[in-house]
Image (cartoon, grey):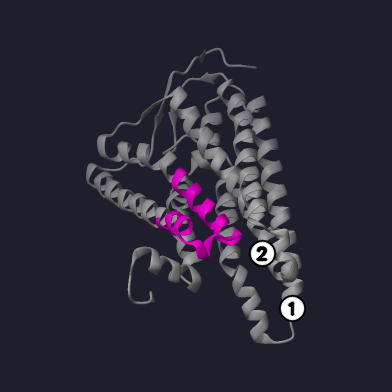
Amino acid sequence: MRGENATQVSAFVLLGFPTGPGLQLLLFLLFLLAYLFVLVENLTIILTVWGSASLHRPMYCFLGSLSFLEVWYVSDILPKMLDGFLLQHRHISFVGCMTQLYFFSSLVCTECVLLASMAYDRYVAICHPLRYQTIITMGQCVRLVAFSFASGFSISAVKVYFISSATFCGSNVLNHFFCDVSPILKLACTAFSTAELVDFVLAFVILVFSLVATVLSYGHITLAVLRIPSATGRWRAFSTCASHLTVVTIFYTAMIFMYVRPQAIDSRSSNKLISAVYTVLTPILNPLIYCLRNAEFKEALRKFLGLSHPMP
C-alpha cells in the first residue's frame, strides 16, 4: 500500500559527497579537469575518424560512435555535479531529474548494445576474414549503431515513464551525485512498485542479451585463435580484439558493482565512489585503450594534427 504521507515531489536534493569546503573545491577542480580531458580526447577521435579517409571503415565507425556516446554521457552527469561542488546548488527539479535519468539510462543501454555490435564485428573479422568486407560494410555498421541508440533510448523511455509515475513519500534527498534509478526508487512509497519491476525486467533483457551476444562472439573468437598453428599468428589475431575485450570487461565489472545489489547504492558511500569512477574514469580510459596501440589511428591523427614527426 502507498504511505499516508505521499506527496507530489517537485524537486530532489542531490546529497553528493558531503565534505568540507576545501575538499569540495579540490573535487571541483579534479572533476573539471577530467571532464575537459574526456571532451578533448573523444572529440579528437570523432574529428580524426570523420576527417581521415583512411579511417572510413566499420571498425573506426564503431570507435567514433563510442566516443560520441562518451561525450554525451559525461555531459549528462558532470555539469550538474560540478555545479554542486562549486556553488553548492544541490537541488534539481523533478523534470530535470527524470531528464538526467533518461539520458543516463539510455546511454548505458546503448553502450551495452554497441559493445555487443563491436564484439560481432571482431567475430566476423577473426572467424570469417575473407568475408569480412562483404558482411560488415559501412552501411551495416551504420545500421548496427542506429539500432544500438534506438533500442537504448526506446527501452529507457518506458523505464523512465514508470519511474516518473511513482508516488514519493517523506524525504526528497537522493543519496547520490546524480539521478540514478535505485536512489529514486528508494524514495518511492512502495517497496516493490511496478516501476521497480519494469526497470528490472527491461534492464535484465538488454543487459543479458547484450552480454550473451558478446560472450558467444568471444567464445567463437577464442576457438578460432586456438586453431592458429603459430604463436605469432595467435597473438596477432588476439591483439585485434584485445582493446575491445578490455573495454567490455571494465564496463560489465562496473555494472555488476553498481547494480547487482541496487539497495547498496543508498547505504554505502563506497558505491558512490564506484559510480564516480565509472562515470569519469571509463570515458577517459576507453579512447586510450583503443588508440594508444593502434598504429593506423596514430598515423591518421598525426596527419590530421599536421605533425611532421611520427607519434610515439
Horizontal side, residue 103 vs residue 150: left or right? left
Q: Is residue 24 above or below residue 220?
A: above
Task: Identify the main secondary structure in magenta.
Answer: helix
The magenta stretch is 44-72
Kindly indicate the quadrant of the structure image that contains residue 161. Answer: top right
Front position in the image: 120 or 61: 61
Q: What residue did someone put label 2 on?
A: 122
Element type at mark 2:
helix
Horizontal side, residue 182 vs residue 132: left or right? left
Question: Residue at horizontal 41%, vertical 53%?
Answer: 43
Magenta-drawn stretch contains 65: yes
Magenta-drawn stretch contains 58: yes
For marks 2 and 1 on the same chain, the one whose residue lies earlier in the sequence: 2
Q: What residue did someone put label 1 on?
A: 226
Q: Position of residue 196 (x, y in %)?
A: 64, 31
Q: Is residue 173 above or below residue 64?
A: above
Q: Amino acid at mark 2?
A: Arg
